Amino acid sequence: MQTSNDKLSATFSALADPTRRAILGRLASGEASVSELAKPMKMTMPAVTKHLKVLQKAGLIRQERRAQWRPCYLVATPLKEASDWVFQYKKFWEESFDRLDEYLKALQAQNVSETVNPKGKRKNKDE
Amino acid sequence: MQTSNDKLSATFSALADPTRRAILGRLASGEASVSELAKPMKMTMPAVTKHLKVLQKAGLIRQERRAQWRPCYLVATPLKEASDWVFQYKKFWEESFDRLDEYLKALQAQNVSETVNPKGKRKNKDE
DNA sequence: GATGTAGTTTACCACTTAGTTAATTAACTA
DNA sequence: TAGTTAATTAACTAAGTGGTAAACTACATC
């Protein structure tokens, strides 16, 4: 189907760590050396190097060589693929807001105090 | 900032597995019992149960009790949050397509055969 | 060539993950 | 009540993850 499974997995897996998301956030405002990236983090340089490798393998960053520095920069295309995947589900989160809205309106209209189960409004295509 | 870090991490982490993405894909077409979900998978039921727990903890699915079945259904709101996070970077993937486009045009116009480095077009706010 | 700075590699650790089989719980059914 | 079906829990294993400290590589400069 869509994008190769492993590529998407690598992307989501890379995004699953707050440190790595912070690195991407930093790189969004321009390229940075490894030590610049490491400075605000509560961990050692080797740990940052490892995170960078994960991001690299996922294709989310690239590194150049400039004298003794290895400046990193963002490559956003895998983010587009992740975004495309998640977007398939857009209608579901929109639907659920609709259902919540309906439910709240129903509540207000009836002014019920009994414990109503909002799940009752879910559609069930399987029976 | 945006959504709580751990929530986003849990969501991305849950999405980082092809089996779990397949489960969400299946649930997009209506709720399903655990064994229905397990059938197409090349793994045992307990393994599927574990994946469902991961999805549950990430808030991506919920399970009901109906006789001896535990039908699962999709809850898409965490997907919206993930989508919102990734969407911060939209301009970057659009930019990179622009740069590719520019580059290809430049190539065609000049018809150069020397090894041009497309990275040269990256902006660099840091110097 | 010696020294300092930037970064990676190696070896190790504790913890988590994805899977298994076997046992257990819970509900329906004859 | 005995048996069947649906699913979870428990105990275990192999592999992966995120971190460390210490050693090493590469470049720059004195």
Image (cartoon, coloured by chain):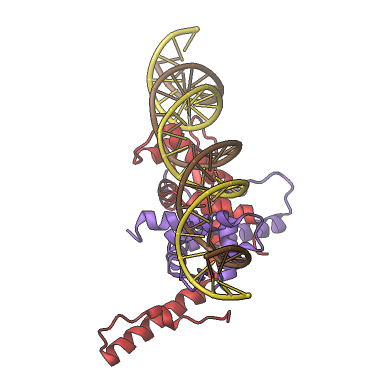
Chain colours: A red, B purple, C yellow, D brown
Percent from the top left, x then y, of residue A57? 58, 44
Residue that extends furthest to the bottom in the rendered view of this protein: A109
Above or below for B81 versus D14: below
Q: Quadrant of the C terminus of chain B?
A: top left
Query: Is A46 left or right of B27, judged from the image as shown?
Result: left
> Where is residue A30 shown, x and y percent of the image?
44, 49
Occupied quadrant, residue A106 = bottom left
Which image quadrant is residue B102 in?
bottom right
Q: Residue at x 53, y 71 (%)?
A: A89
Q: Position of residue A26 (x, y in %)?
A: 41, 49
The picture places residue A7, in percent across and down from the top left corner, at: 61, 53
Determine the residue positioned at 35% across, 61% down. B2
* Res A99 → quadrant: bottom left
User: Could you tell me which quadrant the N terminus of chain B lies in?
Assistant: bottom left
Q: In the shown orientation, is residue A42 left or right of residue B84?
A: left
Question: Which residue is at the front of the view, D15 or C9?
Answer: D15
Residue under the image location 28 percent in, 92 percent down: A110
Question: Visible in this render: residue B99?
Answer: no
Residue A3 visible here:
yes
- Residue at 46% x, 52% y is A16
